[in-house]
Image (spheres, rainbow, N blue to C red):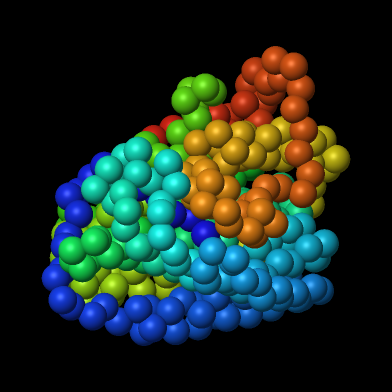
């Protein structure tokens, strides 16, 4: 599960209020079912295999993985609900007020790596974090979003992806999509490569600027929007013919994806530091990947256009 600790906005504290964590958990489990069913239908050859696991320190999860499908080369849709005492350094370094807290974190996180290089990789997660301080005050926030990583990008797909993202945000204020779109562009950026990981989407964390019910409603809107945004793109591109050279380019670009997850991703860092289940944490890594010394696409090629045109922090809608 992806859990991150951004320094904005300030934490909310709710004293002596019981949060509906079971309601959130039930929705997350249902969302995992819906997404897995839709993606398995789209693949048409393989289904997700499920593994239930327990975390010795507290909690557990339900990992679902689809491999070697007709459309999905490797995909994972994970639910986890972990709890315990003593947060790892990746959490308390940015949030010293969390030191000594009992915590609970639950969410759904997924990464889909299609076989066809004309179908983008997609990532999404939705989550809730709750901490109890020694004085019994409660700290909570929601986080999540979804983003798209194309290899042979199509402009109409990029616009559609962001249109669905904006529609999911619209009931909550006109400023929500621009803020969380910009946050996504900032977060999924490979500083050592000086390039975005993909064409973005939505990213938000520490979400408690609204009350709990409104914040949870927003989380549900984002969760429902993922498959609405992704499945039509898969349907359009999954039968596009491709060459071995295009598969090779996909493998090189997947290397960028792996670099981000291993170097920057807060969820990966938190999961490993907190004693999470390694197989579930690293299921986001692509099945086949390549690196080459000083590798770069030929100037003027379709492959070069990916970084020169599509992998830019642009406004896709206006």
Which residue is depicted at the point 23% across and 80% down? 18
The reply, left or right, for residue 185 in relation to residue 305 is left
The image quarter in which residue 219 lies: bottom left
The reply, left or right, for residue 7 in relation to residue 106 is left
Residue 260 in percent (x, y) is at: 56, 37
Residue 104 in percent (x, y) is at: 39, 66
Q: Nearer the viewer, residue 30 or 116?
A: 30
Which residue is depicted at the point 32% across and 58% down? 101
Q: Quick check: 215 above or below 316?
A: below
The reply, left or right, for residue 163 in relation to residue 269 is left
Q: Nearer the viewer, residue 53 or 46?
A: 53
Which residue is depicted at the point 30% across and 82% down? 20
Q: Nearer the viewer, residue 43 or 138?
A: 138
Q: Nearer the viewer, residue 97 or 255?
A: 97
The image quarter in which residue 123 lies: bottom right
Residue 223 in percent (x, y) is at: 42, 69
Which residue is depicted at the point 77% across and 49% down? 287
Q: Quick check: 259 above or below 203?
A: above
- Total numbered labels: 0
Residue 209 in percent (x, y) is at: 16, 59
């Amino acid at each position: 599960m992806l859990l991150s600790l951004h320094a904005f906005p300030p934490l909310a504290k709710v004293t002596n209020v019981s949060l509906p964590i079971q309601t959130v958990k039930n929705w997350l489990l249902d969302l995992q079912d819906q997404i897995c069913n839709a993606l398995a239908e789209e693949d048409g050859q393989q289904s997700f295999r499920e593994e239930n696991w327990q975390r010795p320190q507290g909690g557990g999860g339900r990992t679902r993985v689809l491999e070697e499908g007709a459309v999905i080369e490797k995909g994972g849709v994970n639910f986890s609900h972990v709890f315990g005492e003593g947060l790892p350094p990746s959490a308390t370094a940015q949030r010293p007020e969390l030191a000594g807290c009992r915590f609970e974190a639950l969410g759904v996180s997924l990464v889909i790596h299609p076989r066809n290089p004309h179908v983008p990789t997609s990532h999404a997660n939705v989550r809730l974090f709750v901490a109890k301080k020694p004085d019994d005050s409660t700290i909570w926030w929601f986080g999540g979003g979804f983003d798209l990583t194309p290899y042979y990008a199509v402009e109409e797909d990029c616009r559609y992806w962001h249109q669905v993202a904006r529609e999911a945000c619209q009931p909550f204020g006109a400023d929500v999509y621009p803020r969380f779109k910009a946050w996504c562009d900032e977060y999924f950026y490979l500083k050592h490569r000086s390039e975005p990981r993909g064409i973005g989407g939505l990213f938000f964390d520490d979400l408690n600027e609204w009350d709990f019910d409104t914040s949870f409603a927003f989380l549900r809107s984002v969760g429902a929007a993922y498959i609405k945004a992704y499945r039509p793109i898969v349907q359009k591109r999954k039968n596009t013919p491709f060459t071995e050279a295009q598969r090779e380019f996909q493998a090189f670009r997947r290397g960028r994806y792996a670099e981000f997850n291993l170097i920057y991703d807060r969820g990966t860092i938190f999961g490993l530091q907190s004693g999470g289940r390694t197989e579930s944490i690293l299921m986001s890594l692509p099945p086949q990947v390549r690196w080459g010394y000083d590798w770069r696409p030929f100037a003027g090629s379709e492959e070069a256009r990916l970084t020169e045109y599509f992998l830019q922090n642009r406004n896709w809608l206006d």
